[in-house]
Image (tube, rainbow, N blue to C red):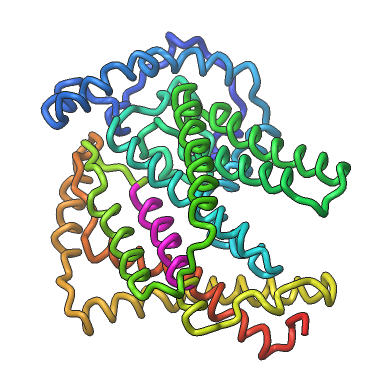
Amino acid sequence: MTVEESLRPRGLSAPQDFEDTNVLKHPGNHPLERYQTRMGRVRYAMRCYLTRFTDNQSYKLYEWQSSHRSTYRDIFFACTSLLASHTFYVLCLPIPAFIGQLDLVRDMVYVLGYSIYVSGFLKDYWCLPRPRSPPLHRITLSAYTALEYGAPSSHSANATAVTFLLLWNIWCSATLSWVTKSFCYILALFYYFTLVVGRIYCGMHGLLDIISGAIIGILCFAARIAIKHLLKDFRLGDHLWFPFVSISWGLLLLFKHVKPVEECPCFQDSVAFIGVVSGFECSGWLIEVMKITSDEGMGIEKGFQYFIYRLVVGIACVAVWKYCVSEPLVYNILLKVLQFPDDRPEKIAEHAASNEEEECPLYIGEPKIDIIGRFFIYAGIPFVVLVVCPPMFSLLHITSN
């Protein structure tokens, strides 16, 4: 259900009045035999154990949702859910880089990339359903998210990792006054609880989804802080092998990703974020090797006006790459230069055949060329931010020099 549909006048019916005739259209809701025959023994045992927390959650969540719904809250939580979408991060994550905060961007890229990957991996591994609709009303501006499995919640994983990172940086800041720190703490916590509570309010997740996602976010944050401390003296530019290892590691994670039982689109977000991680690493390596200035002239010494100029130019460059240049460039290189086999027609035919069925189709997968293509398309975003934007700012005289 889209937010527009959810805003119609409604009278709350009793749970027994609902009959979910479309339950098999959503992944994770089929009889146990479908999963038992397609999962290993340990994987299936884990799924059976976890379904004890998901089988009877829908009506309790429905009662909570029904008692709190209003038109204003529907609009508010539907819109704020976009604050954890991959499109939001693609456009907003580069912003700190435009004022010289590359270290913060680097940390956020890592915690977001791996929290998305781990939560997506476990979604496809466990194959657990979302809370059922009906009885719950699904309130979302992104209909494809309803086609994903439920636990863990990637929104919860993202929000937890980002919030802990923000709180950590606020705590460690030596320049902020206690008043400013307190205000920033409140904003970070408001962001967190808005996203997490919103996933339950919108009928998209249950408690198991939220809690497991939060655990993943905490672990990704802790791992990033620990690795950052251990590798504080590591210089990318001293190692010519680094970009090859980074790209190989990213593609290995994607091609060794667990295969879900049914089709689930969350893997596409994993491809995008792992691509961003690898692109950031390779761009950082290139900056050190070529002695390219990446953050000089990105401060705000000339005032807020120059930051706005850089913001407009920088986001425009990212948008041009993402939505205009990247796809034809990357696919032409893969198909015409590297002669990579195009397996898209076969997959398109399989998807077309499966879409004729009433039920959620079994896993077919994405074409390999699309996985590699999407990986490099998103890897190009940090390259644009770190390597292309600084000389563009200098050319337009919107640096701090």
Q: What is the quadrant of the C terminus in the image?
A: bottom right
The x and y percentages for residue 82 are 57, 47
Q: Is residue 322 visible?
A: no
Q: In the image, 174: left or right of 272? A: right
Q: Is residue 299 visible?
A: yes
Q: In the image, 169: left or right of 211? A: right
Residue 272 counted in the magenta span: yes
The residue nearer to you, when weighing 178 against 251, is 178
Q: Start and end of the magenta stretch?
A: 267-283
The x and y percentages for residue 368 are 21, 61
The residue nearer to you, when weighing 150 against 208, is 208
- What residue is shown at x 33% (from left), y 19% (from top)? 50
- What residue is shown at x 60% (from left), y 77% (from top)? 294
- What residue is shown at x 18% (from left), y 27% (from top)? 35
Residue 30 counted in the magenta span: no
Residue reaching furthest to the left: 37
- What residue is shown at x 67% (from left), y 32% (from top)? 73
The x and y percentages for residue 231 are 49, 56
- Is most of the magenta stretch helix, strand or loop? helix
155 relative to 173, above or below: above
